[in-house]
Amino acid sequence: MKKALKIPKFKNEDKEREFWWKLDLSKYFEPSDFERVSFPNLKPTSHPISIRIPDYLLNRIKEKANEIHVPYQSLIKRYIAQGVLEKL
């Protein structure tokens, strides 16, 4: 650690936001000061969408989901994610 960081008392959120926005943490911490952490219960934000899928395709997806014991919407998300990652 380079030098101690003193955090003042803030009158309001705007003052606190301004303080953190202008602060250069590299003056106070070395890379070795940080610890790896994980957030096991953190879930990504999701948004509901509507898409039109032909009946035969939706039925096939539901059958496959039933075979592997997962909800069909989760299977659709998995397929979409795989398709996106293949294109990267």
Image: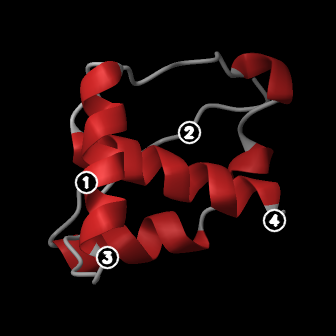
> Circle 3 sits on which residue?
53
Provide the residue designation for mark 4: 87
Q: Nearer the viewer, residue 54 or 79?
A: 54
- Indicate left or right for 2 with 23 as reference: right
Quarter occupied by the N terminus = top right
Q: CA distance from mark 3 to mark 1?
A: 10 Å
Does dot 4 land on a helix, a strand or a loop?
loop
Image position of 69 with respect to 14: above or below? above
Residue position marked by numbered label 1 in the rendering: 59
User: Marks 3 and 2: which is nearer the front?
Assistant: 3
User: Which quadrant of the view contains residue 23?
Assistant: bottom right
Name the residue rendered at 82%, 18% in the picture. Answer: 32
- The crowd level at tag 2 (other Cα within 10 Å; few <14, some 14-19, many 20+) is few
Q: Position of residue 2 (x, y in %)?
A: 79, 30
Separation of residues labelled 1 and 4 (CA atoms): 26 Å
Mark 3–mark 2 distance (CA, rounded to whole Å): 55 Å
Within 10 Å of disc 3 (Cα), the crowding (few <14, some 14-19, many 20+) is few
Left or right: 66 in relation to 30: left
Q: Residues within 10 Å of mark 4 (few under 14, many from 20)?
A: few
Which tag, 1 or 4, sits closer to the chain's start?
A: 1
Vertical position of residue 79 compared to residue 41: above or below: below
The amino acid on which the numbered mark 1 sits, given as a three-letter code, is Asn
Q: Nearer the viewer, residue 53 or 87?
A: 53
> Label 1's element?
helix
Q: Would you say 22 lies left or right of 48 here?
A: right
| Precedes in sequence: disc 3 or disc 1 | 3
> Is there any visible trace of residue 75 in the rendered image?
yes
Instruction: Name which residue type carries label 4.
Output: Lys
Q: The residue under label 2 is which amino acid type?
A: Leu
Q: CA distance from mark 4 to mark 3?
A: 22 Å
- Of the numbered discs in the image, which one, if any, rests on residue 8? none
